Image (cartoon, rainbow, N blue to C red):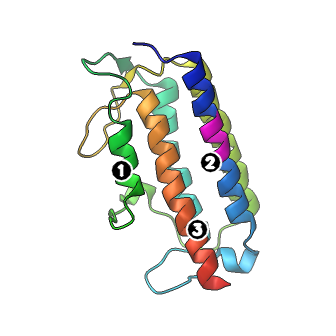
Amino acid sequence: MNVKPLEQVKLINEIETFHQDLDSALSRFSAETLNAVPFQGSWTAGQVAEHIIKSQLHIIAPLSEGLTSTADRLYDQEVNTIQEIFRDKESKAKTDKSIAPGPPPHKLKALLGTLQKQKEQQIEIIKTKKLEGFSVSLEFPGIGKLSRYEWIHMMIEHGQRHRRQIDTIYGKLH
């Protein structure tokens, strides 16, 4: 089964809405509060943004350039599972070192610029790549291989979860 053009448009709209919401959330911070720790054990808003960027970076390149295969399941079968994972407010996963943020300071303009480039790359994948293809070089823990369509949803859900974290940080600092 192929991804329909209407589904592609919907996915592009979701990417654009997510990035607009994230940009708005980050733009509320001053240079000082972007790098302020809101409570012990927390990342700064800048670090959360860097984590989103690093996470997306590890996914975008293989989706753009990597090999894909077919699978014996629907290309969107795991979307609900992905949504459940990232919308669960009680769960907290340990961050892999490869996508952990560095220490402050972070520059808002640089973060927003990188996020804008990533948004453009995500949209390019949606427009030009076969979304039904399953990435052979990426696996999601506990699920396994995902289609490009599912990986796009994963980036949206992961990013929205951390955008809510940025909102919480803002609330603690103001």
Q: Which mark is residue 18?
A: 2
Give the extent of the magenta segment: 13-17
Residue 75 position in % (x across, y down):
37, 24
> On the picture, is 153 further left or further right than 146?
right
Give x and y (percent) for residue 121. Answer: 62, 34
Q: CA distance from mark 2 to mark 1?
A: 17 Å
Assess whether mark 2 and mark 3 are in contact (beta carbons under 8 angstroms): no
- Rounded to the nearest whole Å, what is the CA distance between mark 3 and mark 1? 20 Å
- Secondary element at image label 1: helix
Q: Is residue 53 magenta?
A: no
Q: Residues within 10 Å of mark 1 (few under 14, many from 20)?
A: few
Element type at mark 2: helix
Q: Of 80 and 75, which appears nearest the observer? A: 80
Amino acid identity at mark 2 = Phe
Work out whether 66 lies above or below 154.
above
SS for tag 3? helix
Numbered badge on residue 84? 1
Q: Nearer the viewer, residue 103 or 76?
A: 76
Which amino acid, by three-letter code, is at mark 1? Glu
Circle 2 Cα neighbour tier, 10 Å, few/some/many (<14 / 14–19 / ≥20): some
* Residue 166: assigned label: 3
